[in-house]
Amino acid sequence: MTVNTQSVAERPDPRAFGLPVVEQAQIPAELRSLVARVHDLIDAVANTEADADTLAEAASTVEGLTDGLNVARRQIGTMVQRDLQSGDTEFGTITNIVAGDTNPAAPPLLLERTPEGLRGEVTLNTVYQGPPGLVHGGWIAALLDQAVGSVSAVETAPGLTANLNVDYRRPTPLFTPLEVTSWVERVEGRKVFVAGRIRAHGEVTAEATALMIQVSVPGTQEG
Ligand SMILES: CCCCCCCCCCCCCCCC(=O)SCCNC(=O)CCNC(=O)[C@H](O)C(C)(C)COP(=O)(O)OP(=O)(O)OC[C@H]1O[C@@H](n2cnc3c(N)ncnc32)[C@H](O)[C@@H]1OP(=O)(O)O
């Protein structure tokens, strides 16, 4: 395995792209609480069989809440800076659909560094359902895309997915802890070849290989 051992300090900082950065610890507890409650709300709405009056009242309440929150919105592209247990720093978009801290639709998938790459666990409910009782294939790809993109960013440099191949080996169940792992296979210039896997009950349900292309940074030789 050939891995670019660029130190954290040398990795590009989103501020160099003019993107606002929020440190994870600065996200207000009240916002975290709201995100968790709306996450549960999405599940409740997706599954409710409440009567018409209850539904109408809920719709009106939610509309009012939405108007209240929209008075102050973040800039698109706002990043969150996470300090991993390993001591590494990771950047991600704060509303990332898979892992974003402020996105109530995100499961979220939280990844930590391991000697091999990254590892995380996530349990998905019916919001992520495709076939009955099973995770939607697009979401399986999304989990794997996030895992391989993050490992490329943490171990080499941030990039965009140029190619993602997913093999669906077994149905991936809802309401079951899923272990998601990813690792860098090799680096060739800006091309980072990465791979990832999802396991349920220790059995591989899906695996992916991907090609990430490192993004250039303004003001550097590559930029
Ligand atoms: C610092 C601030 C930001 C911080 C950030 C933090 C992020 C923290 C992690 C977040 C994790 C998110 C994980 C989700 C990740 C997505 O969801 S990314 C979104 C989906 N992907 C996209 O939208 C990408 C769309 N595609 C593109 O923009 C362009 O095609 C690319 C990928 C940037 C490449 O374009 P390019 O830079 O012009 O490069 P290009 O010269 O075409 O190709 C470079 C090399 O790659 C090869 N190549 C390109 N495409 C392919 C392909 N599909 N197949 C095979 N080879 C290919 C070329 O042949 C070439 O090879 P060589 O000739 O050098 O040998």
Image (cartoon, rainbow, N blue to C red):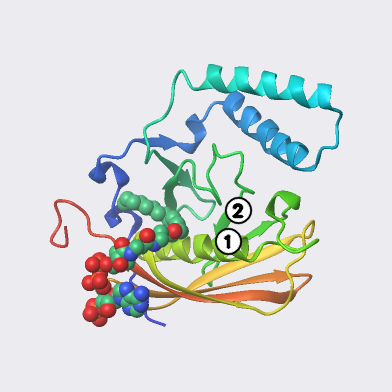
Compared to 18, does 162 lie above or below? below
Q: Could you tell which of marks 1 and 2 lies nearer the N-terminus?
A: 2
The residue closer to the viewer here, 77 or 14, is 77
Can you name the residue that lies furthest to the front here?
Answer: 52
For the point 75% across and 23% down, which residue is it? 56
Q: Nearer the viewer, mark 1 or mark 2?
A: 1
Q: Secondary structure at mark 2?
A: loop
Which residue is painted at 86% across and 28% down in the image? 51
As drawn, the label of residue 16 is none
Q: Amino acid at mark 1?
A: Leu
Answer with left or right where residue 153 lies relative to residue 62: left
Q: Amino acid at mark 2?
A: Leu
Rendered location of residue 206, percent (x, y): 64, 74
Q: Is residue 181 left or right of residue 91?
A: right
- On screen, 59 above or below 124? above
Q: Is residue 182 visible?
A: yes
Q: Position of residue 24 (x, y in %)?
A: 49, 37
Disc 1 vs disc 2: Cβ atoms closer than 8 Å?
yes
Q: Which residue is mark 1?
A: 143
Q: Which image quarter has ligand 1? A: bottom left
Crowding around mark 1 (Cα neighbors within 10 Å: few <14, some 14 to 19, many 20+) is many
Which quadrant is home to the N terminus? Answer: bottom left
Could you tell me which quadrant the C terminus lies in? bottom left
Q: Residue at x 54, y 69 (%)?
A: 182
Whether residue 59 is situated above or below residue 46 in the rendered picture: above
Is residue 40 left or right of 19 when viewed as pictured? Answer: right
Residue found farthest to the bottom: 1
Residue under numbered circle 2: 109
